[in-house]
């Protein structure tokens, strides 16, 4: 009898644990969806890595265009990761989208990974079949099943901060620092040394992503994010021009694809725009928002 009571109590505690785990996960996922802009039917999706995360302010664009904007950007994501992200988005919103603003950058089609274990960003959305399949190919079995079973474990400290930002309505670029002379000097010593690779497998994933976007009757706006001019000069000039030429030709040949290169004189020569050579600060972010908002207004127009 004592054993029965003991096991009954254990069972009760297990049920209680998973009940509260489920309730907590609902609270956390709601905050994360708020942050990304998944809590309303988006007209525009911004997708990319940290460059677009720092470069765009979702609410500013919404205020200027009167369009609902989702900003699904995560640090260090590759072209493969972003295919999973966009597939996940269309799983939630298969019809509402007009435009995908798709960040492009010099290392997008190379084998370079700017961050490790990026797949952990996606644990909160493990219930989505596309994300589930993606994580299975990256995580070991123990990690996969642990996060599958215990839902609150899907949110690490980094994601908890994002959840709080979602509830507080914070999407501003808080970086106000500017480039210093030491960083500039280090870049001067590396001019022309970095070759830009364009791997065939990465290009195929990119094309599949564009096909996915257009299959949902949406347009793709490819945006080359601004890079501080001395950092831009560290890339081999010919390979950078080949990349831009490829994107220009692809956009000119394909329906519902457009390319905008923000590596313009007015955006890349002012060090006050940058918190580091690749990322805009809050001062520079406003300039990108104005350019993109103007483009969206000309092409989509606000809804009344």
Image (cartoon, grey):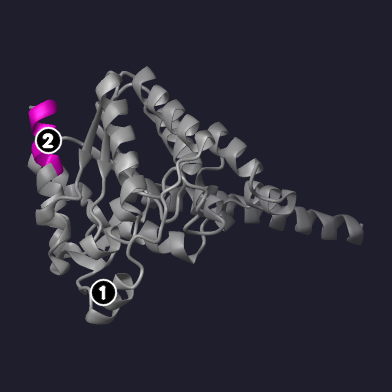
Range shown magenta: 292-303
The picture places residue 258, in percent across and down from the top left corner, at 23, 29
| Residue 17, picture quadrant | bottom right
* The C terminus lies in quadrant: top left
Q: Give the x, y percent position of residue 113.
A: 50, 54
Which residue is located at x 36 percent, y 68 percent?
190
Q: Residue at x 58, y 51 (%)?
A: 151
Pointer 1: what residue? 184
Tell me the element at label 2: helix
Name the N-terminal-most of marks 1 and 2. Answer: 1
Residue 301 visible, this orientation: no
Q: Is residue 32 left or right of residue 226?
A: right
Residue at figure coordinates x 29%, y 20% from the top left: 253
- Image point 83% across, 56% down: which residue? 7
Q: Nearer the viewer, residue 164 or 287?
A: 287
Q: What secondary structure predominates along the stretch shown in magenta?
A: helix
């Amino acid at each position: 009898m004592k054993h029965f009571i003991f096991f009954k109590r254990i069972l009760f505690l297990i049920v209680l644990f998973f009940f509260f785990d489920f309730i907590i996960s609902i609270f956390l996922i709601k905050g994360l969806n708020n942050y990304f802009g998944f809590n309303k039917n988006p007209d525009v999706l911004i997708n990319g890595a940290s460059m677009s995360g720092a470069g765009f302010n979702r609410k500013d664009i919404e205020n200027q265009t009167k369009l609902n904007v989702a900003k699904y950007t995560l640090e260090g994501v590759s072209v493969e990761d972003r295919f999973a992200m966009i597939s996940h988005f269309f799983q939630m919103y298969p019809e509402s989208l007009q435009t995908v603003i798709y960040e492009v950058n010099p290392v997008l089609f190379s084998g370079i990974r700017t961050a490790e274990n990026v797949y952990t960003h996606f644990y909160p959305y493990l219930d989505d079949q596309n994300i589930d399949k993606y994580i299975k190919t990256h995580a070991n079995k123990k990690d996969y099943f642990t996060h599958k079973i215990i839902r609150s474990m899907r949110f690490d400290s980094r994601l908890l901060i994002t959840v709080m930002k979602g509830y507080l309505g914070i999407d501003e670029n808080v970086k106000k620092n500017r480039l210093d002379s030491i960083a500039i000097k280090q870049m001067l010593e590396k001019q022309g040394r970095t070759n830009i690779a364009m791997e065939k497998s990465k290009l195929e994933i990119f094309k599949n992503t564009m096909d996915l976007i257009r299959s949902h009757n949406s347009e793709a706006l490819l945006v080359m994010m601004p890079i501080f001019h001395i950092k831009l000069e560290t890339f081999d000039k010919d390979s950078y021009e080949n990349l831009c030429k490829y994107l220009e030709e692809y956009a000119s040949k394909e329906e519902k694809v457009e390319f905008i290169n923000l590596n313009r004189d007015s955006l890349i020569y002012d060090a006050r725009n940058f918190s580091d050579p690749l990322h805009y600060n809050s001062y520079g972010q406003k300039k990108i928002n104005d350019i993109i908002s103007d483009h969206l207004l000309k092409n989509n127009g606000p809804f009344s």
